[in-house]
Amino acid sequence: MAAPVCVARIGAAHGVRGAVRLWTFTEDPLAVKDYGPLMTKDGTRQFEVTHVREAKDHLVVTLKGVASRDDAERLNGLELYVPRDRLPDTDDGEYYHTDLIGLAAVTTTDQPLGKVIAIHNFGAGDIIEIAPPQGATMLLPFTNAVVPTVDLDGGRVVIDLPKEIDGESDGDDPSAA
């Protein structure tokens, strides 16, 4: 079985009949009902979506076997996964975040930078986080300009480091900003 991919996170209970708020991490939020049973990362618990409707910024779902508000409240914060092979293939230039985690990061001159440890999106676009062998992690825009090459087969991403990074000083007079 392929490695599991996180597709959703359960939020607070909704109503008194066991429905929950569900935040999805899929391009089409309603697709979570098409992937078969959703499971915990360790695979010990599975949940079948029996009813789904869209709300303002999330879904409201009913899960088989979750019949009360108390049952629903116990699931708050639980991440739900599906095996990678149940997800659709990606188009050229599209990647599942899970496929990028652990790839080596190198410069355009093939100098090692570290490993990709996360992809974030805080609302202004994707950010790639790279952990160097020593020191603080680097957060860089995950754009074609900064990450011109993603080589899944070769196990690496090529990073074209920006000339300036916000918050860094070039050693000049700090009052000259």
Image (tube, helix red, strand yellow):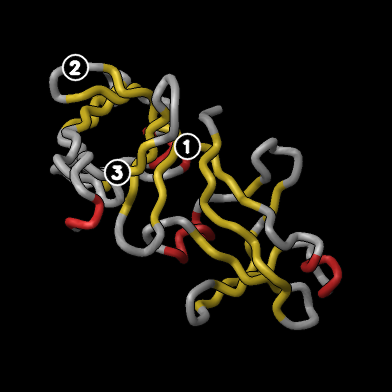
- The picture places residue 40, in percent across and down from the top left corner, at 68, 44
User: CA–CA distance between discs 2 and 3?
Assistant: 18 Å
Q: Secondary structure at mark 2?
A: loop
Residue at the image position 35 percent from the left and 43 percent from the top: 139
Q: Identify which residue is drawn at 17% across, 40% down.
A: 162
The dot on residue 110 is 2
Mark closer to the chain start, 2 or 3: 2
> Label 1 belongs to which residue?
84
Question: What's under tag 2, amino acid-wise?
Answer: Asp
Front one among 74 and 107: 107
Q: Quadrant of residue 101?
A: top left
- The one nearer the camera, 170 or 57, is 170
Residue type, numbered disc 1: Arg
Mark 3 crowd level (few <14, some 14–19, many ≥20, 10 Å Cα): many
Secondary element under disc 3, as helix, strand or loop, is strand
C-beta proximity under 8 Å, tags 1 and 3: no
What secondary structure is marked by label 1? helix
Look at 37% across and 41% down and name the residue there: 96
